[in-house]
Image (cartoon, helix red, strand yellow):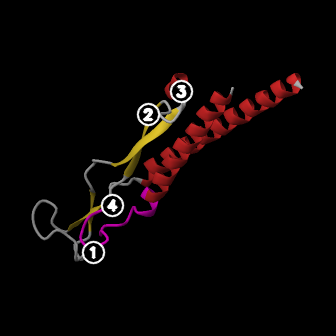
Amino acid sequence: MYGSLDISVGGMIAQRTRLEAISANLANRDVILDSQGRLSPYRRKMVMLASGDPTARTEVGRALGVHVTGIQEDPTPPSWRYEPESPYAEKSGSHKGYVPAPNVNPVYEQIDALAASRAYEANVAAAEASKSMIAQALRLLA
C-alpha cells in the first residue's frame, strides 16, 4: 500500500515541476536579451516526464509512477514583432523592422497550467484515499 503513496507523491512532484516551468515561461515571455545584454529571445521551457521511478527500491516500484527526466528548451523558432523603432529590430532581410520575440504563447501556457494543476489535484486525492485506506487497515489490525 505504501507504493500507492509513492506513485502519488511522484506525480505531485512532476506536476509541481511543470507548474514551475510554466511560471518561468510566463514570467519571461517578453525577455529578448540574455544576461550579457545580447539579443537572444527567451526559449520556452518544457518538462520531460517518463514512466517509472528510478529511485525505487524494488523492481515493481521502478516500473510504477512517473518522474521528471529533464527540462528542455522548446525548439520552435522565435516569433517576430514589428517594432521598426527598436534598436534590436532587424536592419535588413525578410524580417526588416521586426524584433525576435520569445516563443511563449500565454494561452498555451495557461492551458498547460490548468492541466498540470488538475493532475496535481488528482494525485492529492489519490494520496488522501491511500492514506485513508492505510489508516482503516491499521484500525482493523489494532
- Viewer-side label of 2, 4: 2
Q: Earlier in the sequence, mark 2 or mark 3?
A: 2
Measure the alpha-carbon separation of dots 4 and 3. Answer: 35 Å
Measure the alpha-carbon separation of dots 1 and 4. Answer: 12 Å
Q: Can you tell which mark lies on residue 64?
A: 3
Residue at the image position 33 percent from the left and 61 percent from the top: 42
**Hey, which quadrant is residue 140 in on the image?**
top right
**Hey, which quadrant is residue 10 in on the image?**
top right
Residue lying farthest right?
A: 142
Q: Amino acid at mark 1?
A: Gly
**What secondary structure is marked by label 1?**
loop
Q: Which residues are magenta?
A: 25-41
Q: Quadrant of the N terminus?
A: top right
How many numbered discs? 4
Q: Can you tell which mark lies on residue 42?
A: 4
**Hey, which quadrant is residue 98 in on the image?**
bottom left
Measure the alpha-carbon separation of dots 2 and 4. Answer: 25 Å
Q: Which residue is mark 2?
A: 50
Measure the alpha-carbon separation of dots 2 and 1. Answer: 36 Å
Q: Amino acid at mark 3?
A: Leu
Q: Nearer the viewer, residue 73 or 31?
A: 73
Q: Nearer the viewer, residue 120 or 108?
A: 120
Q: Determine if the magenta segment contains residue 129.
A: no
Crowding near the residue tagged with mark 3, few <14, some 14–19, many ≥20 C-alpha atoms within 10 Å = some
Measure the alpha-carbon separation of dots 2 and 3. Answer: 10 Å
**What secondary structure is marked by label 2?**
strand
Residue at the image position 48 percent from the left and 37 percent from the top: 67
Q: Earlier in the sequence, mark 1 or mark 4?
A: 1
Q: Can you tell which mark lies on residue 37?
A: 1
Circles 2 and 3, Cβ within 8 Å, touching? The answer is: no
SS majority, magenta: loop
